[in-house]
Amino acid sequence: MRPFTSTIFAEITELARKTGAVNLGQGFPDTDGPEGMLRIAQQAIADGVNQYPPGPGIPELRTAIAEHRRNRYGSEHDPDSEVLVTVGGTEAMSAAMLALLEPGDEVVLIEPYYDAYPVAVAMAGGVRRTVGLTQGPDHRFVLDVDALRAAVGPQTRALVLNSPHNPTGTVFTAEELAVIAEVCRENDVIAITDEVYEHLLFDGRKHTPLATLPGMAERTLSISSSGKSFSATGWKIGWICGPAELVAAVRSAKQFLTFVGGAPFQPAVAHALRNELGWAEQLRSDLERKRDLLSRGLSEAGFDVLSSEGTYFVCADVRPLGFTDGAQLCRELPDRIGVAAIPVQVFCDHPEATRHLVRFAFCKRDEVLNEAVERLHKLS
Ligand SMILES: *Cc1c(COP(=O)(O)O)cnc(C)c1O
């Protein structure tokens, strides 16, 4: 674990606290999820739903997850053998790595990557290979498909795909998904997809699970979570769906990581998946507007702003402001103008490619974003 001990998140959070900065570093919302969902969790606690739930998750939630995948994407999952409830998307990812990898097996990650992935690979004794997203035309990131093909070989056991993508806000295109699927099929690689932002796509984009592409359902483990869709990141109710034999392997690992979690939250999330998708759609359109508000503010402050197509995040190039290093700017920002953000290079094995980029979170109340924008104007 030595490579993973120090995190810039802790450093920036501490700086933000000391300086009273508006913290756009942390990716969690500052408002609550749907009231009906919160009420069901409160009632569940009052009703005594406080002991270990069943190992795979309560049947009601597994059924709601399977229905949601069917209604939204046309995917079929047996709630008993092909759906597993986990302690957030994070445990699902770690359990999947532990289930699939033998020591020395390789896992392809797309970088910048979510910070939990390299740790999950390392804890399972795997070796990561990374493929970069590069800044393409139209201010969006594109997958380097040649590098992807080159990264996959006989040692590759799994590939992780996160779309919509944290930290860039990229939604992978149909063409990119097709290449990823082809590479997985041709090299007998298992895809592990992180779809925690599946409801948070902007400008009319639709989420396409990799598992719905030809030949992929039998080799894909699809992960999602209630945290981002229903603004309940502290509940840590996630899930993983896929073919029965892969889910059984993940269940074995999960059993000895946490066994179970979040008994009173499970019926509340089942309710949310069935009855609060309208609420999630409202969240999506609010976030789209907040993305515009912050992107405009960053742009007026002198940043070159990249397009955010989904998630909580937008990335900005610091070079027009005379900086070359996003990490240096992030260390100065709280003190200089009272805003905190995260440099993208910390999510990379090859930090030079993203040294000029900084990630800002816009999943905050309008008054918080407006205050941040006002302060950002002091930069130029
Ligand atoms: C927030 C986040 C997660 C964590 O999900 P939990 O359900 O809180 O464990 C996983 N992946 C990505 C890309 C995220 O941004």
Image (spheres, helix red, strand yellow):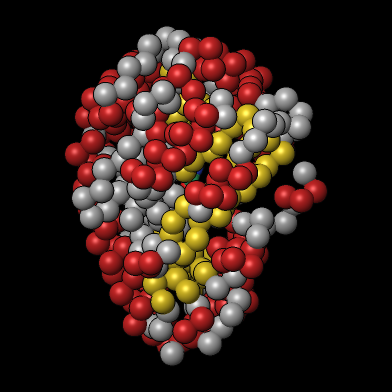
The C terminus - image quarter? bottom left
Q: Is residue 200 left or right of residue 125?
A: left
Taking depth in this image into account, of 375 and 281 the one nearest to the observer is: 281
Residue 98 in the image, given as x and y percentages of width and height: 66, 26
Residue 225 in the image, given as x and y percentages of width and height: 42, 35
Specify the farthest residue to the bottom. 380
Q: State the image quarter where residue 101 is shown.
A: top right
Residue 230 in the image, given as x and y percentages of width and height: 33, 40
Q: Residue at x 56, y 43 (%)?
A: 149
Residue 342's place in the image compared with 74, above or below, is below
Q: Is residue 168 left or right of residue 259?
A: left
Residue 252 visible, this angle: yes
Q: Residue at x 34, y 70 (%)?
A: 295
Residue 295's place in the image compared with 278, above or below, is below
Q: Residue at x 62, y 44 (%)?
A: 151
Q: Residue at x 32, y 37 (%)?
A: 208
Q: Is residue 265 left or right of residue 259?
A: left
The N terminus - image quarter? top right
